[in-house]
Image (cartoon, grey):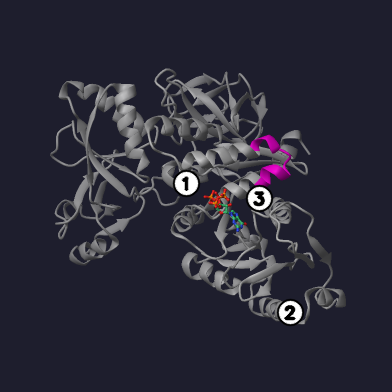
Amino acid sequence: MSELLEKIRKRRTFAIISHPDAGKTTLTEKLLLYGGAIHLAGSVKARKSNRHAVSDWMEIEKQRGISVTSSVLQFDYDGYRVNILDTPGHQDFSEDTYRTLMAADSAVMLIDAAKGVEPQTKKLFWVCHRRHLPIFTFVNKLDRYGRNPFDLMDELEQVLGIRAYPIDWPIGIDGNYKGVYNRMENTIQLFEEDGSHGAKQLKSTTGSLDDPKIKEMLGEELYENLVNDIELLDMAGDEFDMERVNKGELTPMFFGSAMTNFGVQSFLEKFLELSPEPQPRALQNGEIIDPANEKFSAFVFKIQANMNPAHRDRISFIRICSGKFEKGMTVYHKQSGKPIKLAQPQQFMAQERTIVEEAYPGDIIGLFDPGIFGIGDSLSDNSLKLQFEDFPVFPPEIFARVQPKDSLKRKQFEKGIIQLSQEGAIQVFKQEGVGMESYIVGVVGVLQLEVLEYRLKNEYSAQLVMNQLPYSVARWVYAEDKKAVENLKGLDNGMLVYDKKGRPVILVNNEWALNWILDRNPGIEFLTVPADVDQI
Ligand code: G4P
């Protein structure tokens, strides 16, 4: 096997998707601990406490500074090189959160055993699902009361439309769980009885369910219950089918407790075994690039501007898609049509930045960017000059009208707005017949509006007048007859705007309003992504 192929086989790049408080920080920390990256564990925690204190601008700046350093966490485990992509949540939930998923080859969906599928999990799931990413489910907080696992499986199917194959099964009655049975390995793991939250050795044993020692260990009632559940699963549940997992149609399901370490290591090992290595990527021309192609290629999936006016650096994060990356190499930047030397590649590990000497498909690198890169840009070997398929646009949910406070600052204002939209921090829309100095901006997280105001003032010396608009739903409008779009009926409580490519978009207050308008305009279609982008 070539060196490149060997590196690819042993790489895993994934994101953890969850609703706030499901335990993502805790799980990430535990995974890092197993990877021996002990000094990182504290910093993950520090990031968390920072998230709760967004009281002033210094805080946000600090927070952003820290989130730069934790865009990807890398560790080695059992010969694997693991890249965990950080998907910002809480107040800093933004389009970045969605875009990060473009750089992943699989996702771990973390669910609170008592709460099931929550709104943010749902949003992130759909982004993964549209890309057909394999999704692995970890049901967390099994150490305390949780819902019936059949119920949770049913919810995954009803709400997300995905079937589950439980690899573990909780042992217990009425939501009080004692441990898990692993259906693939025929092993039983029980919680420690002293209820300590430490990482102590747990009671565990191996053996099939008809082994008398298992019965003895569990006691009559728990045993009967478990046997019945497993029988039901074997009879009525899905077969394990890796092909369906890879297409994102079946999710392997695990149960455990990140806080008490229960089930985390066995999950990690099974996940590394089953999850995909770096996958081929689609190009604009319909072809694909294989990671084992010896020639380098990568795309930009995230741009982080440092808000500190003293250092105006932007960092562009790239995901390597093929070939080997070497420090100082010169690559072709498709969008500018220029060769670019990648002189100071950085890898971000907790609080430290380290210079990267070499990297492989699946790895993430940060590049200092003098303002040339945009989201979705393609970098590749000079002989390839390839272009990856367009990055998806996500429908924003928060809108504001912005204009410069001082019209003499119009130029700076426009420059700032355009650059921030190129960076992907905001989406910009225009309203027909409204002058150049007024824009509608759309974002997916409310913090982004504050960041916009702050950055325009500090980086472009342009103060804003900003009025938040009462809309929360955006849809690209499609109709054969262009006139029908301009004369849309029933838009009394909404607004028609145009995106930066001139495609019509309506903004309304809720989903109900969409149906109201649809009923009055035969031949019109509403799309969550523009018509010429058919897949996320
Ligand atoms: P997040 O990043 O997804 O937002 O979640 P985070 O890990 O911060 O966890 C949210 C809360 O849930 C924390 O409690 C954490 O300790 C708890 N938690 C995480 N995993 C488990 C688990 O397996 N079992 C139980 N019982 N709790 C769990 P907190 O009180 O908000 O914070 P802390 O004081 O414990 O740090």
Residue at 36% x, 51% y is 529
Q: Which residue type carries mark 2?
A: Val
Q: In terms of depth relative to the viewer, which is nearer, 338 or 445?
A: 445
- Disc 3 marks which residue? 276
Residue at 17% x, 21% y is 408
Residue at 53% x, 25% y is 367
Apparent side of residue 249 relative to residue 95 in the rendered image (left or right): right
Residue at 57% x, 53% y is 23
**Cβ of mark 1 under 8 A from ligand 1:** yes
Q: Earlier in the sequence, mark 1 or mark 3?
A: 1
Apparent side of residue 536 relative to residue 206 in the rendered image (left or right): left
- Disc 1 marks which residue? 89
Q: Position of residue 352 (x, y in %)?
A: 61, 27
Q: Quadrant of the N terminus?
A: top right
Q: Position of residue 369 (x, y in %)?
A: 47, 23
Closer to the observer: label 1 or label 3? 1
Apparent side of residue 155 relative to residue 426 in the rendered image (left or right): right
Q: Which residue type carries mark 1?
A: Gly
Query: Badge 2: how crowded within 10 Å, few (<14), some, or many (20+)?
Result: some
Q: Earlier in the sequence, mark 2 or mark 1?
A: 1
Q: Which residues are magenta?
A: 30-40
Q: Secondary structure at mark 1?
A: loop
Q: Is residue 255 visible from the viewing direction of this image?
A: yes
